[in-house]
Image: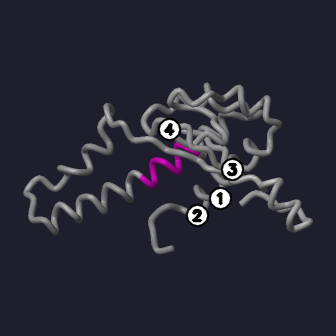
């Protein structure tokens, strides 16, 4: 709450992510493997860590990369939702970083924020989905929806 990211952007991205993560596994796997960007599941780290998670990892700078990774029926809808959200979050982050520079009495106010908006920035964006764990469902005797 109390941020500048429009709720419409959040809702649209959540809806598009829900559609993607609802696809059958073979279709989702067409958007991966995450090398480093793309679709991944269960393997959550370079050390072989595992978890009950699936995700999409994007570079935050190249709008065209969405087409490669999203195998949804309307990748352009996903792309627009993702880019709108990332742009709004970047704008908010830049404002915060500039306030930090000001608070630190740094003359060049954009000293930190320019690192985020630079075309060579290594910023990434990750969408996580935690599907119901079958082991937990068996214990609870129920099924749950996406979280």
Alpha carbons under labels 3 and 1: distance apart: 24 Å
Badge nearest the viewer, 3 or 2: 3
Q: Residue at x 56, y 43 (%)?
A: 49
Residue nearest the observer in this picture, 71 or 28: 28
Disc 2 crowd rating (10 Å Cα; few below 14, some 14-19, many 20+) is few
Q: In this image, 94 relative to 4: left or right? A: left
Q: Which residues are magenta?
A: 82-89
Q: In the rendered view, tell whether residue 140 sits above or below residue 24.
A: below
Where residue 47 is drawn, which disc sits there?
4
Q: In the rendered view, tell whether residue 24 sits above or below residue 33.
A: below
Q: Identify the image quadrant of residue 14.
A: bottom right
Q: Which residue is mark 2?
A: 7
Looking at the image, is mark 4 or mark 1 earlier in the sequence?
Answer: 1
Disc 4 is placed on an element classified as loop
Alpha carbons under labels 4 and 2: distance apart: 36 Å
Alpha carbons under labels 3 and 2: distance apart: 28 Å
Check if mark 2's residue and mark 1's residue have beta carbons within 8 Å. yes
Q: Main secondary structure of the magenta part?
A: helix
Where residue 11 is drawn, which disc sits there?
1
Disc 2 is placed on an element classified as helix
Check if mark 3's residue and mark 1's residue have beta carbons within 8 Å. no
Alpha carbons under labels 4 and 3: distance apart: 16 Å
Q: Residue at x 38, y 59 (%)?
A: 92
Badge nearest the viewer, 3 or 1: 3
Residue 124, percent from left and from top: 45, 41
Disc 3 is placed on an element classified as strand
Residue 117, percent from left and from top: 32, 42
Badge nearest the viewer, 4 or 1: 4
Q: In this image, 112 relative to 15: left or right? A: left
């Amino acid at each position: 709450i109390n941020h500048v990211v429009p709720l419409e952007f959040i809702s649209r991205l959540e809806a598009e992510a829900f559609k993607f993560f609802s696809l059958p596994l073979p279709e989702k796997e067409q958007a991966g493997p995450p090398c480093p960007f793309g679709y991944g599941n269960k393997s959550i780290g370079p050390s072989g860590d595992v978890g009950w998670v699936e995700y999409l990892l994007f570079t935050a700078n190249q709008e065209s990369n969405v087409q490669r990774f999203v195998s949804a029926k309307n990748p352009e809808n996903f792309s627009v939702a993702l880019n709108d959200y990332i742009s709004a979050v970047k704008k908010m982050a830049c404002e915060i970083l500039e306030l930090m520079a000001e608070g630190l009495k740094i003359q060049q106010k954009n000293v930190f924020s320019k690192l985020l908006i630079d075309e060579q920035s290594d910023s990434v964006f990750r969408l996580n989905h935690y599907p119901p764990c079958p082991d937990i469902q068996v214990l609870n005797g129920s099924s749950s929806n996406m979280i």
